[in-house]
Amino acid sequence: MARLRIGSRGSQLALWQANHIAALLRGRGNEVEIEIIKTIGDKITDVPLAKVGTKGMFTKEIEEALAAGRVDLAVHSLKDLPTEITSGFEIAAVPKRDDPRDVFCSRKYASIEALPKAARVGTSSLRRQAQLKALRADLDLHPLRGNVDTRLAKLEGGEYDAVILAAAGLNRLGKTESIKQFISADVMCPAAGQGALAVEVRARDTATLQLLTFLDDSDARATTICERALLGRLGGGCQVPIGAMAEMRSGRLHLRAVVANPDGSLVLRESGDGEDPVQLGESVGDALLRRGGKAILEAVYGQKMALPQPP
């Protein structure tokens, strides 16, 4: 069988993900090795993600290794991939998805509602920050960077009363003991692609593509295409709070989405159902733009946006 080299970031979670895919490939008789590649997002750890603003900050260097032939495939957290895949690459597989929700982690408190006034909460994203502020404007929110262990250590060390993390990462690493509450997507809509992995390859590398076909999960592929279509319609990026969560319901897609002011003063929520993932994502995105999302995005991006015209 084939000898395959996987490119991955070096964090504990990234390596779990790469080793998970490697084990599935080895189960098919392939030889697999993993090459750790440091990205700009790994190097800049003292600045909130929204202020870094670098497209592909967790993927660019891995794609460069892929293009150069140093690795044959890359394993990413799908939410780290830019909405538009770089020319020359494609997503060969989106494996079965883990829980896409966010979770509330604390040593002393059972839920967001149970936090005392002015409790110190750590969160790494504007999306979470905006939805938290809308729910509890009294909370004292602070940026939280670093890998899962670093964030949990800061919680255990008493730097925060609570932190908000992705359920999938804690599930994968077996670090669920700090989870006190799974947050409904109606309260905190997750990031597009959260809980999903993306296996990326060079476009037209048909041999590797064929080897990876068995990893692709049709539901995970459809739901993430839908979420990323919405993100693309809204302009995407980590500088603005945008959430999207699609799921299959009786053979049809149901999409919930949010766009919000960073300060939580206005949170727009929209949902819809459909069969075509791209069409559904774009139509829900259009609805958000018409309801006030355009003004929010223009304020964040600092430029005028043209509303999509109806067909």
Image (cartoon, helix red, strand yellow):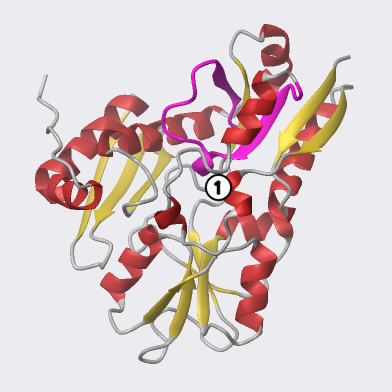
User: Residue 273, percent across and down?
Assistant: 28, 36
User: Residue 136, percent across and down?
Assistant: 31, 78
Q: In this view, does 227 lie to the left or right of 174?
A: left
Q: Nearer the viewer, residue 9 or 112?
A: 9
Give the residue at the far bottom of this rendering: 116
x 10%, y 42%: residue? 290
Where's the N terminus, which quadrant?
A: top right
Q: Which of 149 and 253 is in front in this view?
A: 149
x 65%, y 33%: residue? 62
Residue 295, placed above or below residue 186: above
Residue extent of the magenta highlight: 70-95
x 18%, y 52%: residue? 299
Report the residue marked by disc 1. Answer: 195
Residue 95 seen from this side: no
Callout 1: SS: loop
x 31%, y 47%: residue? 256
Taking the magenta stretch, the answer to whether it contains residue 88 is yes
Answer with the quarter of the image where residue 106 lies. bottom right
User: Residue 6, percent across and down?
Assistant: 76, 30
Residue type, label 1: Gly
